[in-house]
Amino acid sequence: MELTHEFTVPADVATTFAAFSRVESMAECFPGAEVTSVDGDAFTGSVKIKLGPIALTFNGEGEFTEKELAADGSSGRMVLSAKGKDRRGNGTAGAEAVVVLAPGGDAADGPTTDVEVTTDLQIGGKVASMGRGLVQEVSDKMLGRFTDCLEKKLT
């Protein structure tokens, strides 16, 4: 299942890239997420998600498989791969997220960055039976909270 989200943050591309590179800081903005360890570009942690009547806690691992900031700081791209299992055995999830950063316009407060996140999500077990609509709805809500938090961190 492919999910695409686009949003704008109130910071230049280089600042936004640096923020996205700090896994612990980004996890604080992702509802239900907790990072338990970081080793270079790899990390482990958990995320709690409620999909309809099912509450899930995925324990897993992830890593940045690509991080590239243009030499002049005008654009950036990163690829994050993650996988996990629900601790109660209700499902599995794997994802590859491609984050593309591009200069936005200049706002009254300064430069902005347009962010596009394309996620290839694979789900299995009970969670797979919940349907794409519910998964999309939950991911949209989570991303809304994430972007609100990220905006506060970058201003």
Image (cartoon, rainbow, N blue to C red):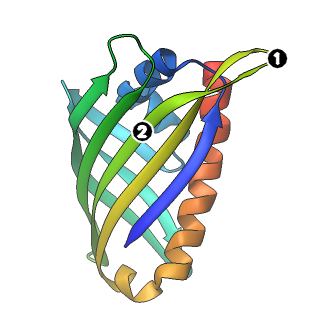
Of 72 and 47, which appears nearest the observer?
72
Tell me which label, 1 or 2, sits earlier in the chain.
2
Left or right position of 78 against 61:
right
Place of residue 29 in the rendered image (x, y in percent of width and height, measured from the top left): 54, 38
| Occupied quadrant, residue 150 | top right
**Residue 108: numbered disc:** 1
Give the answer, above or below, for where 15 lies relative to 144.
above
Residue depicted at x 21% and y 47%: 61
**Residue 100: numbered disc:** 2
Q: Amino acid at mark 1?
A: Ala
Q: Amino acid at mark 2?
A: Val
In the image as oriented, which residue stretches furthest toward the right? 108
Residue depicted at x 26% and y 76%: 89
In the image as oriented, which residue stretches furthest toward the bottom? 129
Numbered disc total: 2
The N terminus sits in image quarter: bottom left
Alpha-carbon span between mark 1 and mark 2: 23 Å
In the image as oriented, which residue stretches furthest toward the top? 72
Of 47 and 75, which appears nearest the observer?
75
Provide the secondary structure element on which disc 2 rests.
strand
Place of residue 147 in the rendered image (x, y in percent of width and height, measured from the top left): 62, 40
Place of residue 11 in the rendered image (x, y in percent of width and height, measured from the top left): 61, 20
Place of residue 32 in the rendered image (x, y in percent of width and height, measured from the top left): 49, 50
